Image: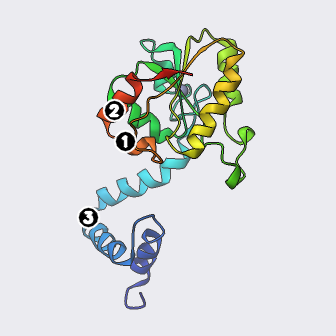
Amino acid sequence: MKYYARPLSNLIGQLTKLPGIGKKTAQRLAFYILSMEDESITELAEAISEIKGKLDYCSVCNNLTESDPCPICRDTKRDKSIICVIENVKDIIAMEKTGEFQGVYHVLHGAISPMDGVGPDDIRIQGLLDRINNNEVEEIILATDPNVEGEATAMYIAKLLKSLEIKTTRIAHGLPAGGDLEYADEVTLSKALEGRQEI
Ligand SMILES: [Zn+2]
């Protein structure tokens, strides 16, 4: 990158740090940004610099939000007695796209994975139990990923919930095994939700 002026090589260097962006793509993007209107560049730069400072976790469901509680938890039309437990914030978007789910969420921010040293205390299970203890909850839908860690996490939570006498369901199989919920298409995810079974 020694051929480029410093600001340009700096931008290319920053862009190559992003996942899926190689040197060539970074160069193309950098030149594209250079050709943009000043105003658009400022908007892009502001959007990037705002992303951390203006976002926080919802104190109820752990969703990423600009205002606490998040819009889903604040929505009076949503059924607070059904909580769908998912691993990541991105899974909320996948579920919302189906347009099928009218309940609320609980984001664990991970899954139990002894191999990676992630135990039950390292993900946000306690918050879920607190919600159940403090609210009228009728059903917990375990929608963790259909892979080893996701299954282990679902089983662990199901065991904890047994004593609380709350209907606990696991979304149906049919989702690509070993996959991530966020990559499932809307139809598959809708069907998995519809076909959930009590465990
Ligand atoms: Zn929330």
Q: In this view, does 122 lie to the left or right of 33?
A: right
Which residue is outermost to the top? 136
Which residue corresponds to mark 2? Answer: 97
Q: Earlier in the sequence, mark 2 or mark 1?
A: 2
Note whether 117 is above or below 188 in the view shown: below
* Mark 1 neighbour class, 10 Å CA radius: few under 14, some 14 to 19, many 20 or more: some
Residue position marked by numbered label 3 in the rendering: 36
Earlier residue among tags 3 and 2: 3
Residue plotted at (33% across, 60% down): 41
The kind of residue tagged 2 is Lys
Identify the secondary structure beneath mark 1.
loop
Q: Give how far across and how far down residue 124 sits, in percent.
A: 66, 35
Quadrant of the rendering where the C terminus is positioned: top right
Disc 1 marks which residue? Answer: 184
Tell me the kind of residue under disc 1: Ala
- Does the residue at mark 2 contact the one at mark 1 (Cβ under 8 Å)? no
The crowd level at tag 3 (other Cα within 10 Å; few <14, some 14-19, many 20+) is few
Residue drawn where x is 39% and y is 68% of the image: 21
Figure check: 118 above or below 36: above
Q: In which quarter of the image is ligand 1?
A: top right
Residue at (43% x, 53% y) in the render:
46
| CA distance for labels 2 and 1 | 11 Å
Marks 3 & 2, CB-CB < 8 Å contact: no
Which image quadrant for residue 31?
Answer: bottom left
Estimate the spatial distance between the alpha carbons at disc 1 and disc 3, rounded to whole Å: 35 Å
Q: Earlier in the sequence, mark 1 or mark 3?
A: 3
Label 2 secondary element: helix
Mark 3 close to ligand 1, CB under 8 Å = no
Residue sitting at the far bottom: 3
| Rendered image quadrant of residue 58 | top right
